[in-house]
Image (cartoon, helix red, strand yellow):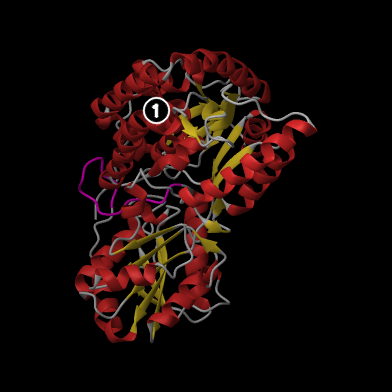
Amino acid sequence: MALMSASPLHPSFIAELDRDLVATSGTTRAVTAPFTGEVLHELPHSSVSDVSDAFARARMAQLAWARAGFAHRRAVLLQAHDNVLERREALLDVLQSETGKTRGQAFEEFFQVLSVTRYNALAARPVLRGERRRGGIPTVVSTRVRYKPKGVAGVITPWNYPLSLAAMDVVPALAAGCGVVQKADDQGALSILAVRQAFIDAGVPRALWAVVAGDGAEIGGAVTDEADYICFTGSTATGRGVAEKAGRRLVGASLELGGKNPLIVLDDVDPEKAAADAAYACFSSMGQLCVSIERIYVERGVAEPFIAALAARVSNLVQGANFDFGSDVGSLTTPAQLARVQEHVADAVAKGATIVAGGNARPDLGPLFFEPTVLSGVTSEMACFAGETFGPVVAISVVDSEEEAILAANASDYGLNASVFSGSTARGLRLAKAIDAGSVNVNEGYRGSFSSVDAPMGGVKQSGVGRRNGREGLLRFVEPVTISHATGLVQLPRTGAEFAALSGVMLVMAAVLKGIRRR
C-alpha cells in the first residue's frame, strides 16, 4: 500500500504547455489527476475553425519540410531523441500525473518514444529513397519508383498511452516528410504537448506538428475531414466511423482498435515464472492497454499450481500513487474506466463467476484505484467474456489440450495480440502460428512485439486495419510514384508494320526472360 501523492507539475509549466494548443474557442475543460481526483488543469478546447487553421499552416510548413530532405530530417529527429532523453524526469511526471501509471510503466512508455524516434530517423532514407524496378522491356524502358509524402496526416490518439501512441504515428509521418495535425484526448494532452516541445526545440517547425483538443466527434471529425491520411487509435465502434469518413473521401487510414487478447499457458511451464509474467501482461498500466491480456487458457496439467501462483502474485502486488518506482500497479485513469471495471466484475460474480484474487475498489488509496482481479468460471452470458474490459480484470479457464486452447483463443471478434507460454520455445512458436492475431508473443505477454519497432504492429478482424512501426509504418505516409523513360536504344512499335517486324523478337524475349527470371 502506498499513500496518494500530489502531482509534481508546476502550474507555470502546465500553463506553458496549454498555450501550445491550437485553441481559440475560449472554452476549457477541467482535467483531473487520477491519483487524487483533484483538478490538474483547465485544458483549452479547439474549434472546427482552429482545426482548419492548423491544417493550413501545417500544409505550408510541410512543403519546406519535404524539400529539406532525408539528411535534415534525420538530424532533427536524432536531436529530438536526445532532447526526450534529457527531459525524461519531467516527461515521466507529466505522464503519471495524467494517466495514473506507475513510474516503471511510465518509463516503459517513455522508452518506446526513444526507440520509435531513433528507428524512424535512421530508417526513413533506406526505406523511402526510391529504387529501380524492372522495366517492361529491359534496356528499352528504364523504371524507378519514388515516394512522395502524402501531405498532412491527421493523428487521433487516446488517453491511455499518450506518449508512445503519438510517437508511433507522428514520428514516421515527420520522417517521411509529412506534417501532422494531432487530436489529443483531454486526459493525455499535456504528455503530448511536453514531448512535442522536445521535437520543436530540436528543429521541427512549430506549425508542422499542430495539436488540437476538444469533443471527439466534432474535433476528431474535423481532423478526419481534412487529413491526407488518417491514423486512429481507439474503440472499434469509433474506428468504423473514422473508416467510413476516410472511405468517402478516398484517403488512406490505419486503425488500431480494440482487443480481447488471449494467453495460452501450456503444461510444460514453470508455474511460478509463468504466473509472474502473466500478472504483468494482464495488469501493466492497470490493463488499460490495447495489447494487454484479458483471457488466460491454462492446460489442466499445470492449472492448479499456476492458478495458485497467479493468485499469490496478484495479491502481493504493491498498489499505490508514487512518483517513484515504489509501486507495482497504479490507478485507473478515468471514472468511466472504474465504472466499467466494477460493472464487469459485479456482472460476472452475479452470474456465477468466482473471484480468485482482487475484486475490490480501493478508495483508501485514491478515487480510481481498483485491485487487479482474476476471475474463474466466466461464461458467455457475462459482459467480460467477449467484451473488452480495458481494465485490471482477467478471466482464467482450464483446457484439456493445445487444440482446445487454440480454438478458444481464436473464438473472438478481435485479433490484436496474443501470447503463448511454454517451457519449449519450439512448441510455443508452433502454437503461435495457429493464432489469429496481428502480433503473437512467446513467453512474453506483449512487450516482445510492442517493443520491436522494426516490425509491423496492428490487428486483424475487428481489431483494425493497417500497420504501424517498421517499413510498413513509414510507407503509410507516402504515395509510390512510378517513373519510366524510354532509353532510345530501340523504338517501341507504333504501327501495324512495326509490330509485325518486332513481334517475333518480342516473343523470343518473353521466353528468354521466363527462363532467367526467378521472381
Relative to 391, is 304 on the left or the right? left
Q: Position of residue 30 (x, y in %)?
A: 51, 33
In magenta stretch: residue 329:
yes
Magenta portion: prevailing SS class: loop
Q: Position of residue 198 (x, y in %)?
A: 35, 22
Q: Looking at the image, which is closer to me, 159 or 8?
A: 159
Q: Looking at the image, which is closer to me, 498 or 234?
A: 498
Q: Quadrant of residue 7?
A: top left
In magenta stretch: residue 362:
no
Q: Quadrant of residue 6?
A: top left
Q: Position of residue 418 (x, y in %)?
A: 41, 63
Q: Amino acid at mark 1?
A: Arg
Q: Looking at the image, which is closer to me, 70 or 445?
A: 70
Q: What residue is shown at x 36% (from left), y 43% (from top)?
A: 454
Q: Is residue 357 shown to the viewer in this render?
A: no
Q: Which region of the structure is painted magenta?
A: 320-333
Within-10-Å neighbours for mark 1: few <14, some 14–19, many 20+: some
Q: Which residue is mark 1?
A: 125
Q: Position of residue 180 (x, y in %)?
A: 52, 26
Q: Is residue 420 shown to the viewer in this render?
A: yes
Dot 1: what SS? Answer: helix
